[in-house]
Amino acid sequence: MASNTFGKLFAVTTFGESHGPAIGCVIDGCPPGLAIAPEDFPHDLERRATGRTRHTSARHEADEVEILSGVYEGVTTGTPVALLIRNTDARSKDYANIAAQFRPGHADYTYWQKYGIRDPRGGGRSSARETTMRVAAAVVAKKWLAEKYGVQVRGYLAQIGDVTPRAFDVDNVEWAVVESNPFFWPDATQVAELESYMDALRKSGDSVGARVDVIADGLPPGWGEPIYGKLDGELAAALMSINAVKGVEIGDGFASVAQKGSLHRDEISADGFLSNHAGGILGGISTGQDLRCSTAFKPTSSLRLPVQSLDTAGNVVEVVTTGRHDPCVGIRATPICEAMVALVLMDQALRHRAQCGDVGEVSPRIPAKADPKKPDSGKPDSGKPDSGKR
Ligand code: EPS
């Protein structure tokens, strides 16, 4: 595999398999002088981890980060930051019966076809276990972005199966609510309903898809490199690189197809932008508005419900998966999507500084959001994506 490195100036390489001795990453290009300690990692790693609630895989990894290099006396030195997490709760015998079978809907078959060999234990390299290191690397990126630019990258679950948040305003996400329930769900009134939904799903042995929305605020205008390094293009590639992702939207995304230009264009008043259908990106460059993206996760393919398939010898077999799988992998994908957005922003921020650091602030700097309380900035559409979408 020659594609295990992500980013140009903040380049993250991950390594390791789900049931190997450890997983890890090397961040090359981290700016010096950033305070980083082991205590910075548990918050996001716990949000992503399995085995913390009954609604995710029961595998319980400690996910303790060891900082192997690049940090001296608690501060990054500019040399490669190497992070390691040891795997401590792998149960490889769960995979013995499917080691020579292809789970329908899983990467088993394509890894086999590409490499002619695969590590079947826990999905090997194709396991969501690998995303732990993306989240760990993004802890560094999120911290730098917050300290240097005041950028915050936060996500929430915007759909599980056909359930969507009922009372919800994308301009006023209640982040305390999102962080207080196991689903990263923005509507507190639906949490009990989701618990029952997920309990029934788990008992049935089936799985379901989900949508994760991420908002990054505090971005300055100017990040993103036309033409082949557009901010939206790199976000799409980064989010699509997460296991089980089948779609990415920026701003109104596919809803833009049915919109009129008179609605979609984000009008500009003296007080700032009056809406954000574009998701904070124009021409592949950040506008300074909130960056908004959505990611679609397919239902987990590893199920205990029997299904027909072939084995590596070409025989028809019945596949039953007995590993500890997530009934909805999209739930704990929320911090993973945040991580990929943060890694893209970190890389683009450094690239912008490298090429355009001398440009300075250009007038006029349009406020990200006009104050809807001001009478002359009030528009019916103010600050909202198209009314039907979320
Ligand atoms: C995964 C299968 C399960 C999950 C794993 C992702 O592995 P196992 O059967 O070994 O428990 O637990 O997720 C993690 C361990 C993790 O940290 O995300 C898969 O097939 O993707």
Image (tube, helix red, strand yellow):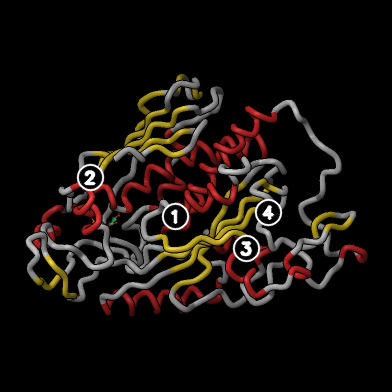
Q: Is residue 379 left or right of residue 254?
A: right
- Amino acid under disc 3: Glu
- The residue at which mark 4 appears reads as 280
- How far is disc 3 from disc 4 in space, using C-alphas? 20 Å
- How far is disc 3 from disc 2 in space, using C-alphas? 35 Å
Up-down relation of residue 87 to residue 49 (above or below): above
Q: Residue at x 40, y 37 (%)?
A: 5
User: Looking at the image, do the residues carrying marks 4 and 2 touch, with CB atoms under 8 Å apart?
Assistant: no
Mark 3 / mark 4, whichever is N-terminal: 3
- How far is disc 1 from disc 3 in space, using C-alphas? 27 Å
- How far is disc 2 from disc 1 in space, using C-alphas? 28 Å
Mark 4 / mark 1, whichever is N-terminal: 1
- The residue at which mark 3 appears reads as 174
- Amino acid under disc 2: Thr
Mark 3 burial class by Cα count in 10 Å: few <14, some 14-19, many 20+: some
Location of residue 375 (image quadrant)? bottom right
Mark 3 / mark 2, whichever is N-terminal: 2
Q: Residue at x 18, y 75 (%)?
A: 307
Residue 88: image tag: 2
Mark 4 burial class by Cα count in 10 Å: few <14, some 14-19, many 20+: many
User: Looking at the image, do the residues carrying marks 3 and 4 touch, with CB atoms under 8 Å apart?
Assistant: no
- How far is disc 4 from disc 2 in space, using C-alphas? 41 Å
Frontmost residue, 99 versus 1: 1
Q: Residue at x 46, y 33 (%)?
A: 11
Q: Quadrant of ligand 1?
A: bottom left
Examine the rendering and report whether any part of residue 32 can be seen: yes
Question: Which-is-in-front pick, marks 4 and 2?
Answer: 4
Mark 2 burial class by Cα count in 10 Å: few <14, some 14-19, many 20+: some
Q: Is residue 332 left or right of residue 372?
A: left
Frontmost residue, 163 versus 295: 295
